[in-house]
């Protein structure tokens, strides 16, 4: 696509905006606004109901995701600057949109977002393992995703219901494979042009067309993201939140109890082997 842009730079004014993973809105048009369940949003939605329990991240434990309203604002300001004729003729400006300088580090803030605004119906308590090694990810992915999916589909077949879990995990695997190489590399994209562009704006325009990555509190953003997926993409209403929170607490008790039983059984087996 950028080669095509290069080919027409002498005929029409052009510039390039390179976004990373684009997530739900941070503030505009509404906090958490999103109109689909694709890509990154699909991952978060599946995590919020306990279907996805491990994800692959960079060796630094980060995900390069930027809110859609920041990407849109950057695109509008870049087009404004281009249209004003302030750029050099036949010189294509490239504006990288990335959170390199304010990275989202995967931590419990995502789980906190699920707890604050839980889905009405969940499959299991949303506990997520962030894996930085490809080989370990393949092993963990097999045990926490595919084995439960096979067991769940087997139960559905026995009960006379159409199996669906393996189909869901095949889609997840396709999405994971599409971003695997990007996540395996610790790349650093220059944002000098983007910062210079932002600094050309007056205070009012900086507020109206904000794309300053430093202004994002990613703990707050993940909370907003989960709420937006719940409200805008899944059409779940706020009046159902009290009931959803009670259900979430119940599944948390199930989760803690299941781990306690697992540890107890494991210790018992180890004791028998050593006796």
Image (cartoon, grey):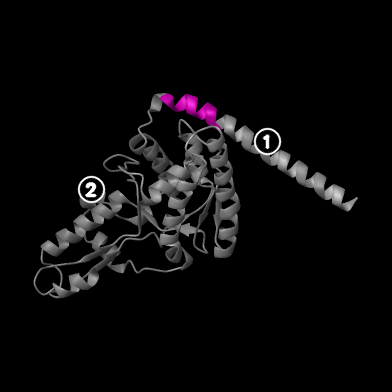
- Residue 260: % across, % down: 71, 39
Residue 166: mark in rendering: none
| Magenta residues, start to end | 240-248
Find the residue positioned furthest to the right: 275
Q: Secondary structure at mark 2?
A: helix
Count the labels in the image.
Answer: 2
Question: Which quadrant holds residue 101?
Answer: bottom left
Foreground mark, 2 or 1, reads 1
- Residue drawn at (39%, 36%), measured in percent from left and top? 230
State if disc 1 and disc 2 touch (CB < 8 Å). Answer: no
Look at the picture and state if 219 lies above or below 92: above
* Badge 1 density bin: few <14, some 14–19, many ≥20, Cα 10 Å: few
Q: Secondary structure at mark 1?
A: helix
Q: Please give left or right for residue 130 compared with residue 270 in the image.
A: left
Residue tagged 2: 208
Look at the picture and state if 92 lies above or below 160: below
Q: CA distance from mark 2 to mark 1?
A: 49 Å
- Residue 204: % across, % down: 21, 49
Residue tagged 1: 257
Q: Please give left or right for residue 215 compared with residue 50 in the image.
A: left
Is 154 or 116 nearer to us in this picture?
A: 154
The tag earlier along the polypeptide, 2 or 1, is 2
- Residue drawn at (58%, 33%), measured in percent from left and top? 251
* Badge 2 density bin: few <14, some 14–19, many ≥20, Cα 10 Å: few
- Residue 136: % across, % down: 59, 61
- Residue 93: % across, % down: 22, 70
- Residue drawn at (38%, 40%), measured in percent from left and top? 229
Q: Main secondary structure of the magenta part?
A: helix
Is 115 or 215 nearer to us in this picture?
A: 115
């Amino acid at each position: 696509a950028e080669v095509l842009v290069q080919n027409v730079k002498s005929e029409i004014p052009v510039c390039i905006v390179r976004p990373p993973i684009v997530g739900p809105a941070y503030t505009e048009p509404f906090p958490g606004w999103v109109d689909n369940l694709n890509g990154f949003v699909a991952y978060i939605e599946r995590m919020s109901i306990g279907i996805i329990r491990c994800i692959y991240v960079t060796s630094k434990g980060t995900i390069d995701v930027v809110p859609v309203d920041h990407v849109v604002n950057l695109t509008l300001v870049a087009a404004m600057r281009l249209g004003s004729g302030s750029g050099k003729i036949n010189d294509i400006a490239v504006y990288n949109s990335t959170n390199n300088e304010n990275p989202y580090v995967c931590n419990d803030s995502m789980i906190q977002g699920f707890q604050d605004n839980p889905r009405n119906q969940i499959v299991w308590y949303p506990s997520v393992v962030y894996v930085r090694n490809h080989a370990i990810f393949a092993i963990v992915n097999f045990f926490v995703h595919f084995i439960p999916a096979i067991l769940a589909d087997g139960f559905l077949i026995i009960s006379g219901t159409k199996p669906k879990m393996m189909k869901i995990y095949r889609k997840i695997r396709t999405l994971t494979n599409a971003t695997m190489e990007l996540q395996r590399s610790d790349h650093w994209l220059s944002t000098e042009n983007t910062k210079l562009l932002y600094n050309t704006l007056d205070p009012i325009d900086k507020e109206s067309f904000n794309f300053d990555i430093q202004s994002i509190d990613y703990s707050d953003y993940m909370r907003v993201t989960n709420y937006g997926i719940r409200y805008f993409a899944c059409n779940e209403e706020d009046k159902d939140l009290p009931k959803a929170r009670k259900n979430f607490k119940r599944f948390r008790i199930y989760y803690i109890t299941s781990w306690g039983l697992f540890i107890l059984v494991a210790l018992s087996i180890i004791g028998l082997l050593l006796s």
